[in-house]
Amino acid sequence: MFDLVSFIPRAVMQGVPLLYGCVGEIYTEKSGNLNLGIPGIMYVGAIGGVIGGFFYEQSSLPVNAFLAIGIPLICSVLASFLMGLLFCFLTVTLRANQNVAGLALTTFGVGVGNFFGGSLIKLSGSDVPSIALSTTSSYFSAKLPFAERLGWFGSVFLNYSFLVYLALIVSAVSAWFLKKTRTGLHLRAVGEDPAAADAVGINVSRYKYCATCFGSVIAGLGGLYYIMDYACGVWSNNGFGDRGWLAIALVIFTIWNPGTAIPASFLFGGMYILYLFIPAGTQLANKEIYKMIPYVVTLAVLILVSVRKKRENDPPSSLGLSFFREDR
């Protein structure tokens, strides 16, 4: 039988990295920047946390929950922020092509992650091509102590780490911020018509920088969560998979709405692991077909959105275009 109580928590945990990446990219695209470097930023955010956690565990400092969480968290935030800053410098200041810059950022991020990851594996003297930060991971993956005593309700709704609840809070607050605040209105104006926004005194470059860097930090937290919680603190090169690309596809699926990103991410997270819960017997070929489900759904959604053209479903009008103030 299909075990729904076991499936839902695993779908949620699988969807949290997608949620972080999706909300981060929504901020970026709302400013008119198309950042295809999200997979690389999530990868760098993950390795940043791993570096911080590794040197903390190797140090002579006494084990402390605040430091075990704070050091990797700060390292991850700084690493992903720098990646966002690099993207903004290329696309906003130098006005480089956003598609090319984003793809280059992904390649660069994966290379940086593999370089430092391989270096840490050598420093640790591991016999396998991976390192395990068990002490740091134990603090990141700590659950609410009373969740297990509440039966299925606790397992489905309360049996998660703090980064899961932080993702929900960030998404909900982002939906409110973009729709209900003056700053959110200015950000959307920059993405829709930067020339008009500039004409009324909005600093277009500053909004693009702030939105893209903040979105990169949020996406980087998705990489940190995946390593420290979902993967139990185990880092192996190229082990992050294609979650960054799915996060970008989710932006279109959610119609650039952070609130919609919550159920959408968990839905895609469920589809990502659905093959583990569908009986396939000895037919391994069927299991490989089941693994294609999230990608087939992504293609179907892109086709559906393209066919059913609605103004409210369109991306920001200036998405992917550089702003030249002299042309105004």
Image (cartoon, helix red, strand yellow):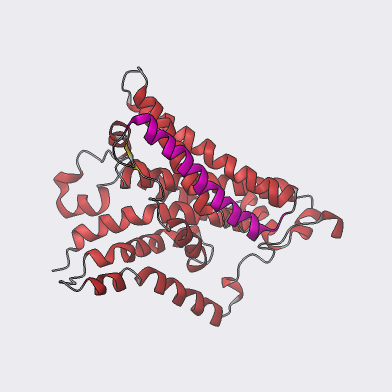
Where does the image place residue 28, in percent across and percent down from the top left?
59, 54
Q: Is there any visible trace of residue 64 in the rendered image?
A: yes
Query: Going 21% across and 49% down the picture, which residue do you hit?
Result: 154
Front-most of residues 125 and 12: 125
Q: Is residue 118 above or below residue 176?
A: above
Specify whether 10 is left or right of 311: left
Query: Going 79% across and 59% down the picture, which residue do you hit?
Result: 195
Query: Going 30% across and 59% down the picture, which residue do you hit?
Result: 11
Query: Going 32% across and 40% down the picture, which residue do you hit?
Result: 233
Where does the image place residue 211, in percent across and percent down from the top left?
61, 49
Specify whether 271 is left or right of 204: left
Where does the image place residue 242, in percent across and percent down from the top left?
43, 58
Q: Is residue 10 magenta?
A: no
Q: Which residues are magenta?
A: 96-125
User: In terms of image quadrants, where is residue 166?
Assistant: top left
Q: Is residue 314 above or below residue 163?
A: below
Q: Is residue 163 above or below residue 253?
A: above
Where does the image place residue 222, in percent across and percent down from the top left?
43, 48
**Which quadrant is the N terminus positioned in?**
bottom left
**Prevailing SS of the magenta stretch:** helix
Specify whether 36 is left or right of 32: left
User: In terms of image quadrants, where is residue 224?
Assistant: top left
Q: Is residue 124 magenta?
A: yes
User: In terms of image quadrants, where is residue 135?
Assistant: top left
Q: Is there any visible trace of residue 219 in the rendered image?
A: no
